[in-house]
Image: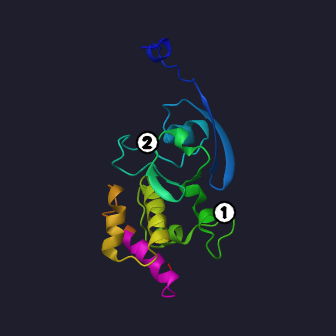
Amino acid sequence: MSAAAGAPREWPDRVALRFALNGRAVDAWAAPHDTLLAVLRDTLGATEVKYGCGEGVCGTCTVLLDGAPINACLTLGVHAQGRTITTVRGLAAAAGAPGTAAGDMHPLQRAFVAHEAAQCGFCTPGMLLTAYALLADHPHPTRAEIRTALGGNLCRCTGYTRIVDAVEACVRARQGGDRA
């Protein structure tokens, strides 16, 4: 066995990261073991990303990584390098939705308000981002498909009916039906 093979591996204390956060390039330093949740909240001040269970079962920390919903509590921050992260704060900009200007709400956010789909609001960012990703991949889901897609996001207040109603209203509005 060579000396190099038996030598302890050294890890850097911090790693420089550069990625897009809500459409804006950001730079951050992170320890190799820091979660993306910690990098977003503690380093970059993105407090709209919530800590829930820390085990990936509640969906409260959901963000979009290159458009796909992930649990930021289970993802290492170094995985953001060179990627695109979207939080609920960047939802309207990420959508490029017609009629959304800077600071406007995304149609899903407006539907959540109109249908009173948020009570305490703790789960709402994860619900919105998961629903957004669903509609990006599957623009006309059934009610059952919406419920299945949101299955990884826990809500203790709403009973989910109004959340699913809001997503359905957004789908109908996209199809030219009623307004969300």
In the displayed structure, 169 sits above or below 151; it is below
- What's the residue at 57%, 24% (across, down)? 12
In the rendered view, tell whether residue 68 sits above or below residue 161.
above
Q: Position of residue 36 (x, y in %)?
A: 51, 41
> Quick one: SS at disc 2?
loop
Pair 1/2: label in front: 2
The answer to if 165 sits in the magenta stretch is yes
In the rendered view, does 159 fall on the left or right side of 9? left
Mark 1 vs mark 2: which is more N-terminal?
2
Q: Which residues are magenta?
A: 164-178
Quarter occupied by residue 151 = bottom left
Say whether residue 131 is visible. yes
Estimate the spatial distance between the alpha carbons at disc 1 and disc 2, rounded to whole Å: 27 Å
Q: Which residue is mark 1?
A: 103
The disc labelled 2 sits on which kind of residue? Cys
User: Residue 82 appears at what percent x and percent y?
Assistant: 62, 47
Residue type highlighted by circle 1: Gly
Tag 2 residue: 73
Answer with left or right where residue 116 lies relative to residue 46: left
Q: Residue at x 43, y 60 (%)?
A: 127
Query: Where is the N terminus found, in terms of image quarters?
Result: top left
The front one of 137 and 154 is: 137
Element under disc 1: loop
